[in-house]
Amino acid sequence: MNNIVLLVVDVQSALINEHPYNEEKIIENIRELISTARDNKKEVLYVRHDDGKGTELEHGTDGWQIYSKIAPNENEFIFEKKYNSAFYKTGLKEYLGRKEIDTIILVGLQTEYCIDATCKSAFDYGYKIIIPEDTNTTFDNEYLTGKKLYEFYNYKIWNKRFAEVISVEEVKRLLTMPT
């Protein structure tokens, strides 16, 4: 692991205000990882979704804003996206290439949509992906609860296939290692 980045995807006010599964623990864990990354001079990158005019995630609206409890510092980059993958038409891959990033710590919303698409795109591009436990979330739907979706993707789909799903404490230790 030469160069690592914390990628915070779609933790936006409109989504958090709808109270996804395990939201308080998710936000607290993401806050801890952001703090650890910043304290150890590891880059924190944000991705923000624009769902188009008239939606709760419309560009420029309050709901579109990154959730205030994990907001970026002035010097941190925000990549804007309109598709599920944080890599599709955003410039993220090129940016990571210039920085020689080889490992992505992936956190955010929604588990089965943008986190899944971003995880698999990153895998296809050859990145090592680390998903800290209890740092991604989603909502109940007509088929599964948010909890079941979280468990299914984290432990059945991603872990040991596309990513390593490990504890927040283990990830904090990784962030404190020198590059």
Image (spheres, rainbow, N blue to C red):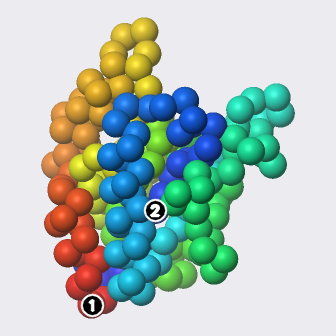
**Would you identify the image quadrant in which residue 130 lies?**
bottom left
Structural distance between the alpha carbons of marks 2 and 1: 19 Å
Amino acid type of the residue tagged 1 in the rendering:
Pro
On screen, residue 138 above or below 178: above
On screen, residue 164 above or below 102: above
Amino acid type of the residue tagged 2 in the rendering:
Leu
Badge 2 is on which residue? 7
The picture places residue 119, in percent across and down from the top left corner, at: 39, 49
**Would you identify the image quadrant in which residue 167 lies?**
bottom left
- Tell me the tag on residue 52: none
The picture places residue 133, in percent across and down from the top left corner, at: 24, 49
| Total marks in image | 2
User: Observer-nearest residue: 7 or 92?
Assistant: 7
The picture places residue 50, in percent across and down from the top left corner, at: 71, 43
Badge 1 is on which residue? 178
On screen, residue 74 above or below 144: below
Res. 114 visible in picture: yes
